[in-house]
Image: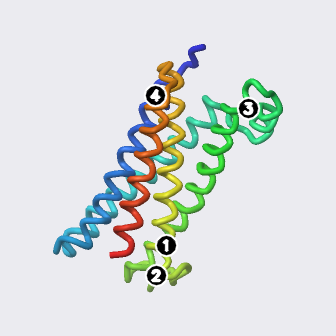
Amino acid sequence: MKIEGLKIHRKLSWFVAFFSLIVLIIVSLRKFLDIYNFYPIIHLTVEWILLGSLIIHCVLSQKYLKLWWIRIFKGLKNERSRPIYILRLIQLITNRVIIILAALVVLSGLGYYEWYAESIGIVIPFELHVYYDFFLLICIIIHVGVGFKFMFIRKRIKNRCSNLFIIIFCCSLTLIIIFLNIL
């Protein structure tokens, strides 16, 4: 069944996933390279592009996929469709958590800038920015892993190698994030 506009949604989804990886790399480079003068401009630009893409992705997801809680819980009752709806439930939960954490990352990140702290006041301390960012990236990894699973289902690739790829991909990215946050 073809849904009009779903192809654009999928391309945007993978753009958001790829851009999230870019953000991870840029955030990590700050610890290893002496680019502090140039870093805030890059970081802000990439974060705002990611945030805008994320908002568009969420709107298109609701429009084309119609992922509503009631629909997912009804799908979970059907034994044949239960595995798909479990994945959809994971996607919906991580989607909502990503939205909340993205807002917290932005608000806590603004506390770094003096103009924001002086004009509006610090609502969320900047120290929490790193923690929110860590959990945001973990949720994005889980969300992208489920997206890979749906891509493999659409391509009719249902074997252990595809599942193993998803597990290794998600675990390796999670370990990288943990390692970079420990440094």
**How many numbered marks does the figure carry?**
4
Q: Which residue is mark 3?
A: 82
Nearest to N terminus: mark 4 or mark 3: 4
Confirm or deny contact between disc 2 and disc 1 (CB under 8 A).
Answer: yes
Instruction: Look at 72% across and 26% down and name the residue there.
Output: 81
The disc at residue 8 is 4
Disc 3, SS: helix
Sequence-wise first label, 2 or 3: 3
| Residue type (three-letter) at the residue carrying disc 3 | Arg
- Which mark is first along the chain, 2 or 4? 4
Which residue matches tag 1? 131
Q: Nearer the viewer, residue 150 or 169?
A: 169
* Location of residue 139 with respect to 35 vertically, above or below: above
Type of residue at label 2?
Glu
Q: Which residue is mark 2?
A: 127
Q: Amino acid at mark 1?
A: Tyr
Q: Secondary structure at mark 4?
A: helix
